[in-house]
Image: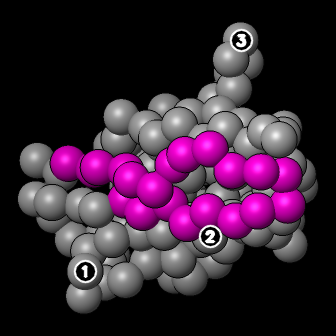
Amino acid sequence: QLQLAESGGGLVQPGGSLRLSCAASGSPLEYTAIGWFRQAPGKAPEGVACLSSDGSTYYAGAVQGRFTISRDNGKNTMYLQMNSLKPEDTGVYSCVDDAAGAVQAMCRHRERFSYWGQGTQVIVSA
């Protein structure tokens, strides 16, 4: 059974950067699609970035050019580098693993993924 554990969230000023980590145990991430979703208070989960098993990526328009998803197979860990953060990036960020289909489609529906973590809080505020 795969387990995912996020870390790296916190309070950051607008314009700042954070790197979220998601350590996996129980199964390798190397051969599966991975992603990051976020949920702001009162809103539905939103797919932020996804990386398919063949290396294709998808980024939500609001984060394109500012966020980067990656994985380190040796550490069995995925990352989300977030730069130029804005107050509207505030939310609980959760990592997800194991989905099939086109990367854009999977990133629009968290339920397509078999596993997801508990989430880490990101607050962007002055």
Residue 89 among magenta residues: no
Q: Position of residue 90 (x, y in %)?
A: 72, 37
Residue 123 visible within the image = yes
Is any atom of residue 112 visible in this view? Answer: no
Left or right of 119 in this view: 23: left
User: Residue most toward the top?
Assistant: 42
- Label 1: few (<14), some (14–19) or many (≥20) C-alpha neighbours in 10 Å: few
Residue occupying image coordinates x 71% and y 11%: 42
Crowd around label 3: few <14 · some 14–19 · many ≥20 (10 Å): few
In the image, which disc is placed on residue 42? 3
Q: Earlier in the sequence, mark 2 or mark 3?
A: 3
Left or right, 48 with reference to 22: right
Q: Residue at x 26, y 74 (%)?
A: 76
Scheme of colours in the image: one colour
Residue assigned mark 1: 75
Q: Which residue is mark 2?
A: 81
**What's the amino acid at mark 1?**
Lys
Work out how far the residue at label 2 is from the one at label 3, CA to CA, in angstroms. 25 Å
- Can you say which quadrant of the picture contains the C terminus? top right
Task: Check residue 18 for magenta coloring.
Answer: yes
Toward which corner of the image does residue 64 lie, by quadrant?
A: bottom right
Picture quadrant where residue 32 is located? bottom left
Q: To which quarter of the image does residue 103 belong?
A: bottom right
- Along the viewing direction, whichever of 55 and 13 lies nearer the viewer: 13
Q: Which residues are magenta?
A: 3-22
Eyeballing the image, is 20 above or below 105?
below
Which is more toward the observer, 17 or 107?
17
